[in-house]
Image: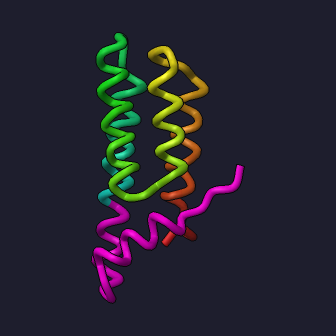
Amino acid sequence: MAFENGALDATLAAAAGDDPALMHELRLAFVESAEKQLDLLKRSRCDGNWHVAAMRLKGLAASFHSDELLDAAENALTSAPGEPTAIRDIESVLQQFSSPSAG
């Protein structure tokens, strides 16, 4: 699966302007927030908690125009709590955003 960070990078650049430090800080905040929701997904033991974490992740993805993360969050919403495939998909997307070559 190929990942494209272009939309996220464009969104961050629009917010940060010509400030690379701010762009880095925004990317870090995005990744940290997404990782927090992923952690909540992993610890969810009921439909309600799973759904809330997946919806928050979906909202974050939509706010930052991250289509890959949006798709993975949508998949989680239609999956049973704790579904390993849904969790792995989200982890894979976040790993791409967290890699040193991203941004």
Decide whether the magenta segment is chiefly helix, strand or loop. Answer: helix
The residue under the point 42% across, 58% down is: 65
Residue 13 screen position, x and y as percent? 37, 77
Residue 1 screen position, x and y as percent? 71, 49
Q: Which colour scheme is used?
A: rainbow
Outermost residue on the top side: it is: 46
Q: Is 59 inside the magenta-drawn segment?
A: no
Most foreground residue, 99 or 5: 5
Picture layout, residue 42 above or below residue 15: above
Residue 36 screen position, x and y as percent? 32, 40
The residue under the point 55% across, 29% down is: 86
Most foreground residue, 86 or 101: 86
* Count of numbered tags: 0
Most foreground residue, 35 or 4: 4
- Where residue 43 sits, quadrant-wise, is top left
The residue under the point 39% across, 27% down is: 41
Residue 89 screen position, x and y as percent? 58, 37
Outermost residue on the right side: it is: 1
Q: Is 19 inside the magenta-drawn segment?
A: yes
The residue under the point 49% across, 65% down is: 7
Picture layout, residue 100 above or below residue 50: below
User: Does 8 sit left or right of 63 as displayed?
Assistant: right
Picture layout, residue 68 above or below residue 56: below
Tell me where the magenta segment starts and ends, as one range. 1-28
User: Does 8 sit left or right of 56 as displayed?
Assistant: right
